[in-house]
Image: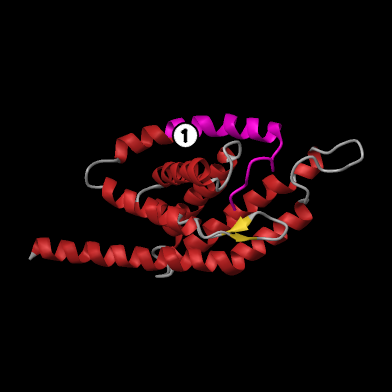
Amino acid sequence: MHIPDGYLSPTTVALSYAVMIPLWAYGFKKLKEKLDEKTLPLLGTLSALSFLIMMFNVPVPGGTSGHAIGTALIAIMFDPWIAFMAVSFVLLIQAVVFGDGGISTWAVNSFDMAFVAAFVGYYTFQFLKDKTKFAPFIAGWFSISVAALCDSIFLGIQPIFWHDAAGHPLYFPFGLSVTIPAMLLAHMGVFGIVEGAFTQIVYSFLQKRAEKAQQEVVA
């Protein structure tokens, strides 16, 4: 799902940064308010897990790549703004150090995999947590599916708006009729299941550990 440099038009890049810079500024403010010596170790661990699972990229024909992201889990354990900032930072490191995703496309990648995935995952979990024990799984699956949809739209509009006089695409070559099915099928059918399972398993583990710690304190 990481979009490399050169896939998006300069206009798309400029608009994406114009939208994301205020969101990052507000997210940084929320991060400073909520982080302390108790929450920082867990956030660091979950961010490292997000970094790790995003490194396993599988090419998606007609899209970019597919992989789990771990954003929903961080959003559930903290809040969507914290998850948004944590995953944005992970994406920046991946782009700068490993060339996984581009610098020019960092804003779009952060919008899809950090902002959208965090808020969709968080509110899906909040809606379902009292209705089913599989709320973490559904939140993870749905969050990455919506993020993939957003990713496919950014890619798919490139040949529609930016092409030469002969109609040849200047940037990403495939339109929405290709990118949406390619990205959604891959993420809803494969990577979404991985994302959901990851979210469910780690959330359940952390909840059991927290309950055990609380019991020990009471005892």
Is residue 195 something that shows in the picture?
yes
The residue that appears at 27% across and 49% down in the rendered structure is 41
Left or right: 46, with 40 as reference point: right
Percent position (x, y) of residue 107? 56, 38
Percent position (x, y) of residue 189? 61, 69
Is the magenta region chiefly helix, strand or loop? helix
Q: In the image, is residue 19 above or below residue 80?
A: above
On the image, which quarter does residue 70 sit in? bottom left
Looking at the rendered image, the quarter that the C terminus falls into is bottom left
Percent position (x, y) of residue 215? 14, 65
SS at badge 1: helix
Question: How busy is the neighbourhood of tag 1: few (under 14 within 10 Å), some, or many (20 plus)?
Answer: some
Determine if the magenta segment contains residue 205: no
Determine if the magenta segment contains residue 10: yes
Left or right: 54, with 79 as reference point: right
The residue that appears at 11% across and 60% down in the rendered structure is 217
Give the farthest residue toward the right.
166
Percent position (x, y) of residue 2? 58, 50
Is residue 135 something that shows in the picture?
no
State the extent of the magenta-drawn residues as a range.
1-26
Left or right: 112, with 164 as reference point: left
Q: In the image, is residue 136 above or below residue 79?
A: below
Number of marks in the rendered image: 1
The amino acid type found where label 1 is placed reads Trp
Colour style of the rendered protein structure: secondary structure
On the image, which quarter does residue 198 sit in? bottom left
The residue that appears at 48% across and 55% down in the rendered structure is 121
On the image, which quarter does residue 146 sit in? bottom right
Q: State the residue position of label 1.
A: 24
The residue that appears at 48% across and 60% down in the rendered structure is 139
